[in-house]
Amino acid sequence: MDVPTYSASDAAVPDGVVVIERASSAQDLGPRLNRTAADVVRFLLTNGEMVAATQSLSDDMIRLFAAEIGADIRLVNPGEEQEVELRRVLEIEDDYDDEIIESWPNRPPVITIMGHVDHGKTLLLDRIRSANVVAGEAGGITQHIGAYQVEQDGHVLTFIDTPGHAAFTAMRARGAEATDVVVLVVAADDGVMPQTLEALAHARAADVPIVVAVNKMDREGADPDRVMSQLAERGLIPEAWGGDTLFIRVSAMTGDGIDELLDSLNVVAEVEDLRATPEGRAAGVVLEANLDIGRGPVATVLVERGTLRVGDPLVTGAAWGRVRAIINDRGENVMSAGPSTPVQVLGLSDVASSGDSFVVAPNEKIAGKVADTREHWLRVASLGRDASATSGGAKLEDFFKQIQAGEAATLNLIVKADVNGSLEAVTDSLRKLERDDVKLAFVLRGVGGISENDVQLAATSNSTILGFNVRPDRKARELAEAEKVEIRNYEIIYNLLEDIENAMLGLLAPEYEEVVTGEAQVREVFRVPRVGAIAGCYVLNGTITRNSKVRFLREGTIIWKGEIQSLRRFKDDAASVASGFECGIGLSDFQDLKDGDIIETFEERLIPVK
C-alpha cells in the first residue's frame, strides 16, 4: 500500500519567531504553527516517523516540520515560553538605544574580586573597606558572596567578593556576570594557580576589563615579574610591556598600593563610561539569599537600574513580596537604593535563588501571579529530574559496602546549608562525583538548620543528611538517634567532598564522631572590664565542662568554634555544670554574644571500622 503524499494546509505561517517548547506533542505543535495535529502526524509519517498525536516529539522532528512549512522557530525548555510571556507582563525592557543610554547619569562601577584560594582576596577587600570578615571564615576561606561600597576621592566603588575555592565556581561566575571590572588577585610569592585561570576564564566570558592586583609584595619570596610573565602568556599583557592590562603591586597586609589600586579602578570606570537610569522600577540580580529565623527570607541584591524602594512589590524567580526593609552594606536601614548599590531586602515569600534576576512588578497582584507561575514550572521541571530520588539508596556506610561488593549503588541525600549560594555549590560539586555505577539522588536541598522534618524525611527515604555550616537542634538530634538517621556536619567543603568521594571509591576510612556533651542557652550577656563578654547561661541538656570544645550556634547556624575559657557558678569557678543549672561562660576569643544563642560543647570519639 502506498503512503499518501503529505500536503500542508494553506493556512499562513505565523510571522516572526515562534517559541516552541521541547518535547511538545503534535497536538501542542500544530496549533502554534496554524496547523492541525493531523498535519504534523501525516508529515512525520511520510518521513518514516510513526507517532501518535499525544506523543512527545524530538527536537529534530519539530525542526523538520517547521522547515517544511517555512516557520521560524526557537526551541526552549519547558517553562521558558511562559518566562518570555512573564517578562512581557512585568514590562521588562532590555534593549535601549545608545542615544537613550547616553542621556542616563553615570553610576558606580561594580568590581569583582577574583583569584586563587589563599591569595589574599578577602584580606585585600578587608583593607579597602576597613572591616574584618576573615575572622568569621572557616579555614580562612570565603564561603559566601559579600558586596560592599567604598568611596575614593569622591567616587563610589561597589565591590563583590567571591569565594576562591574551585567548588564555588558557580558563585564566582555569577559575580562575573554582574560586574563591570574584575580585579584578579595573584600572590607575588605563589604565581598563577588553577583557580587563577578559572577566574580569568570567567572574567573573559563576561567580557569586562581586568586589573591584576599582585598581592603579598611584603613577602620575602615575592616575584611580581614572574606573575606578569605567566599572565602575559595567557593574553594579559602589562601596560609596562606595551599591553593594555594594569598590574598594580599591593600588600593587603601592610596596605601598600591600595590607594593606587583604587585610583586605577576609578580610571578604568571612567573609560568604560558606565551609565544607568535611577528612574523607573528597579531591576537587578540576587547575589545571595538565606533564611533568617527572626527576619524571614533575606536576599542580598545588586540594583542594576531604577531605584528600589521600601514598599515595592518585588519578584525574583518563584519568590515575591512587598519590600519590608532595605539594609545597606553598613547594616543601616535605608528607604531606597539606586543603580550599582548592594543591599539586603526583607519581605520576600521564600528564599530567593542566588544568581536570579529580580524586578519590581507594576503591582502586587502581578508579582504574585508571576511567582506562582514560575513555581509551577519549576516544580514540573523537577519532577522528572528527581523522580529517582526516593528509590533505593543507603546510608554512607551501607553505600560504601555496596560499592566494595561491586554492586551499582545510589546514595540518597538531604543537603542543608546556611545560604543558597553554598547549597548550590555543594550540590553542583557532588553531582560531578557521579559515575555510571555510582549515583547520587537529592531527596531535598534547603537552606537553614537541620530540623525534625528533615530527619523524618531522611528516615522515610533512607537518606543521609549532609549539613554545611548548619547544625541539627536537640530535638532533631534525638529523633535522628531514634530513627538511626545519619547526619554528617561540615564547615569546610573539602572535607564534605572527600568523604563522599571516598565512599564512592570504596575507600571510606575510620572516622571521628562528634558527640554533643552539653547544650546551654545564653539568657543574658555581661560586659566585664578587661575581661570582655561573659554569657549568663542556662544548661538545657547534658553537662558543660571547662576547657571543652564548643560550637556557637545562632538560629541553627555555626558562627564560631573554639573552647570554653572560663566557667563559673555564681562567683566560684566550676569544673562542670549539669543540666538545669545556671552558669557564666567565657569563650576563648569570641565576644559577639546575643540572648537566645546556643553554646554546644562536644568531644570527638573514634569510630572503628566494623
Image: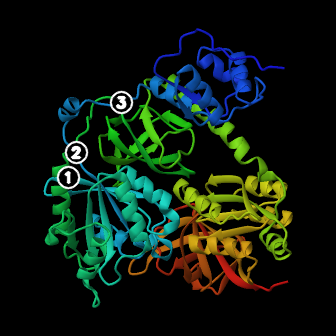
Q: Is residue 471 left or right of residue 259?
A: right
Tell me how the rendering is colored: rainbow
Amino acid type shown at disc 1: Ala
Q: Is residue 161 left or right of 75 when viewed as pictured?
A: left
In the depicted structure, whether residue 532 falls above or below residue 79? below
**Quick one: label 1 or label 2, which is nearer the N terminus?**
1
Residue 9's disc is: none
Q: Please give the name of the residue rendered at 70% of the width and 76% of the height, measured from the top-left corner.
A: 502
The residue indicated by pointer 3 is 281
Position of residue 83 measured from the top left corner of the image (x, y, whole percent): 53, 31
Give the camera-side residue of 245 and 503: 245
User: Which is nearer the N-term, disc 1 or disc 3?
Assistant: 1
Which residue is at 63% across, 52% downward? 446
Q: Nearer the viewer, residue 267 or 594?
A: 267
Neighbour class for label 2 at 10 Å: few (<14), some, many (≥20)?
some
Residue 269, which numbered label?
1
Contact between labelled residues 3 and 1, with CB atoms less than 8 Å apart: no
Q: Amino acid at mark 3?
A: Arg
Percent of width and height locating residue 270 = 16, 50
Q: Is residue 245 left or right of residue 392?
A: left
The residue wearing badge 2 is 274
> How many numbered marks are there?
3
- Which secondary structure lies at badge 3? loop
Residue 471 visible in rendering: no
Nearest the camera: 268 or 148?
268
